[in-house]
Image (cartoon, rainbow, N blue to C red):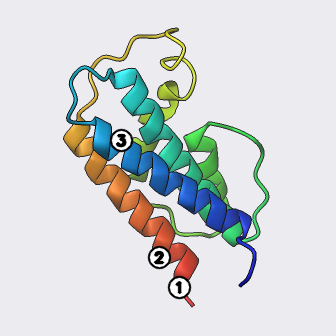
Amino acid sequence: MAEPTLADILLALARQDVLAFRKLAGDMEIGDALLGFHAQQAVEKSLKAVLAHAGIVFRRTHDIAELLDLLADSGLRVPPHSDLLDELNPYAVEMRYGLVQPSGLDRTATLSILDAVLEWAQISLFQP
Protein backbone atom coordinates (compact mmCIF):
# COMPACT_ATOMS: atom_id res chain seq x y z
CA MET A 1 0.00 0.00 0.00
CA ALA A 2 1.33 3.43 -0.94
CA GLU A 3 2.25 5.94 1.73
CA PRO A 4 -0.28 8.75 2.09
CA THR A 5 0.70 11.98 0.43
CA LEU A 6 0.59 15.38 2.12
CA ALA A 7 -2.63 16.03 0.21
CA ASP A 8 -4.15 12.80 1.57
CA ILE A 9 -3.15 13.68 5.13
CA LEU A 10 -4.52 17.21 4.88
CA LEU A 11 -7.79 15.99 3.40
CA ALA A 12 -8.19 13.42 6.19
CA LEU A 13 -7.58 16.17 8.77
CA ALA A 14 -10.13 18.42 7.05
CA ARG A 15 -12.69 15.59 7.25
CA GLN A 16 -12.01 15.32 10.99
CA ASP A 17 -12.61 19.05 11.48
CA VAL A 18 -15.89 18.84 9.56
CA LEU A 19 -16.90 15.85 11.65
CA ALA A 20 -16.08 17.72 14.86
CA PHE A 21 -18.12 20.71 13.67
CA ARG A 22 -21.04 18.46 12.73
CA LYS A 23 -21.06 16.67 16.10
CA LEU A 24 -20.69 19.84 18.18
CA ALA A 25 -22.95 22.19 16.20
CA GLY A 26 -26.16 21.10 17.91
CA ASP A 27 -24.82 21.64 21.41
CA MET A 28 -25.52 25.26 22.32
CA GLU A 29 -23.16 25.01 25.29
CA ILE A 30 -20.31 24.82 22.76
CA GLY A 31 -19.31 28.35 21.86
CA ASP A 32 -19.03 29.78 18.38
CA ALA A 33 -15.29 30.33 18.82
CA LEU A 34 -14.63 26.59 19.09
CA LEU A 35 -16.98 25.73 16.22
CA GLY A 36 -15.57 28.50 14.08
CA PHE A 37 -12.07 27.19 14.72
CA HIS A 38 -13.02 23.76 13.37
CA ALA A 39 -14.75 25.39 10.38
CA GLN A 40 -11.71 27.54 9.61
CA GLN A 41 -9.39 24.57 9.97
CA ALA A 42 -11.53 22.39 7.70
CA VAL A 43 -11.44 25.02 4.96
CA GLU A 44 -7.75 25.77 5.41
CA LYS A 45 -6.78 22.09 5.25
CA SER A 46 -9.06 21.45 2.25
CA LEU A 47 -7.44 24.31 0.32
CA LYS A 48 -3.95 23.16 1.28
CA ALA A 49 -4.78 19.57 0.25
CA VAL A 50 -5.73 20.73 -3.25
CA LEU A 51 -2.63 22.92 -3.50
CA ALA A 52 -0.38 20.08 -2.31
CA HIS A 53 -1.99 17.66 -4.76
CA ALA A 54 -1.27 20.10 -7.59
CA GLY A 55 2.34 20.47 -6.45
CA ILE A 56 1.88 24.12 -5.51
CA VAL A 57 4.12 25.26 -2.67
CA PHE A 58 2.35 27.24 0.04
CA ARG A 59 3.67 28.86 3.16
CA ARG A 60 2.54 28.03 6.68
CA THR A 61 -0.46 30.28 7.08
CA HIS A 62 -3.98 30.33 8.44
CA ASP A 63 -5.00 33.00 5.91
CA ILE A 64 -7.77 31.53 3.77
CA ALA A 65 -7.74 34.56 1.44
CA GLU A 66 -4.04 33.99 0.69
CA LEU A 67 -4.68 30.32 -0.07
CA LEU A 68 -7.62 31.19 -2.33
CA ASP A 69 -5.43 33.69 -4.20
CA LEU A 70 -2.76 31.03 -4.62
CA LEU A 71 -5.32 28.63 -6.08
CA ALA A 72 -6.59 31.25 -8.53
CA ASP A 73 -3.08 32.44 -9.45
CA SER A 74 -2.12 28.82 -10.16
CA GLY A 75 -5.05 28.36 -12.52
CA LEU A 76 -6.83 25.94 -10.22
CA ARG A 77 -10.56 25.94 -9.69
CA VAL A 78 -11.58 27.71 -6.48
CA PRO A 79 -14.07 26.07 -4.12
CA PRO A 80 -17.74 26.92 -3.85
CA HIS A 81 -18.53 29.85 -1.55
CA SER A 82 -15.01 31.21 -2.04
CA ASP A 83 -16.35 34.73 -1.59
CA LEU A 84 -17.42 33.84 1.98
CA LEU A 85 -14.60 31.62 3.18
CA ASP A 86 -12.21 34.28 4.40
CA GLU A 87 -14.89 35.33 6.92
CA LEU A 88 -13.66 32.31 8.89
CA ASN A 89 -10.11 33.76 9.20
CA PRO A 90 -10.65 35.38 12.62
CA TYR A 91 -11.58 31.98 14.09
CA ALA A 92 -8.06 30.69 13.44
CA VAL A 93 -6.37 32.82 16.07
CA GLU A 94 -8.17 35.93 17.27
CA MET A 95 -11.40 34.27 18.36
CA ARG A 96 -9.73 31.03 19.39
CA TYR A 97 -7.70 32.84 22.02
CA GLY A 98 -10.43 35.24 23.08
CA LEU A 99 -8.86 38.27 21.41
CA VAL A 100 -12.15 38.97 19.62
CA GLN A 101 -15.58 37.66 20.56
CA PRO A 102 -17.61 35.99 17.81
CA SER A 103 -20.80 37.76 16.87
CA GLY A 104 -22.87 34.71 15.96
CA LEU A 105 -22.03 31.83 13.71
CA ASP A 106 -24.84 30.45 11.54
CA ARG A 107 -24.13 26.80 12.28
CA THR A 108 -26.47 25.36 9.65
CA ALA A 109 -25.17 27.58 6.84
CA THR A 110 -21.56 27.02 7.90
CA LEU A 111 -22.00 23.25 7.86
CA SER A 112 -23.47 23.44 4.36
CA ILE A 113 -20.46 25.47 3.23
CA LEU A 114 -18.02 23.04 4.87
CA ASP A 115 -19.66 20.08 3.15
CA ALA A 116 -19.41 21.84 -0.23
CA VAL A 117 -15.74 22.77 0.25
CA LEU A 118 -14.84 19.27 1.41
CA GLU A 119 -16.63 17.74 -1.58
CA TRP A 120 -14.76 20.16 -3.89
CA ALA A 121 -11.44 19.09 -2.36
CA GLN A 122 -12.24 15.39 -2.62
CA ILE A 123 -13.23 15.74 -6.26
CA SER A 124 -10.11 17.81 -6.96
CA LEU A 125 -7.87 15.12 -5.49
CA PHE A 126 -9.53 12.11 -7.03
CA GLN A 127 -10.27 13.30 -10.55
CA PRO A 128 -8.14 11.45 -13.07
Classify 126 as above or below 82.
below
Mark 1 Cα shell of 10 Å, populated few (<14), some (14-19), many (≥20): few
Residue that badge 2 annotates: 123
Badge 1 or badge 3: first in the primary sequence: 3
Tell me: residue 45, above or below residue 37.
below
- Amino acid on which the number 1 mark rests in the picture: Gln
Q: Position of residue 123 (x, y in %)?
A: 47, 76
- Name the side, left or right, on which 107 lies relative to 21: left
Which of the 4 quarters of the picture holds residue 74? Answer: bottom right
What residue is pinned by disc 3?
A: 21
Describe residue 101's horizontal placement relative to residue 103 as left or right: right
Q: Which mark is residue 35?
A: none
Q: Residue furthest bottom?
A: 128
Check contact, mark 2 vs mark 3: CB within 8 A: no
What amino acid type should be assigned to the residue bearing mark 3?
Phe
Q: Between tags 2 and 3, which lies in front?
A: 3
Residue occupying image coordinates x 34% and y 58%: 115
Could you tell me if residue 74 is visible in this image?
A: no
Q: State the residue at coordinates (37%, 31%).
A: 35
According to the image, label 1 marks what residue? 127
Q: Position of residue 114 (x, y in %)?
A: 37, 51
Q: Is the Cβ of the residue at disc 1 closer than 8 Å to that at disc 3?
A: no
- View extreme (front): residue: 1
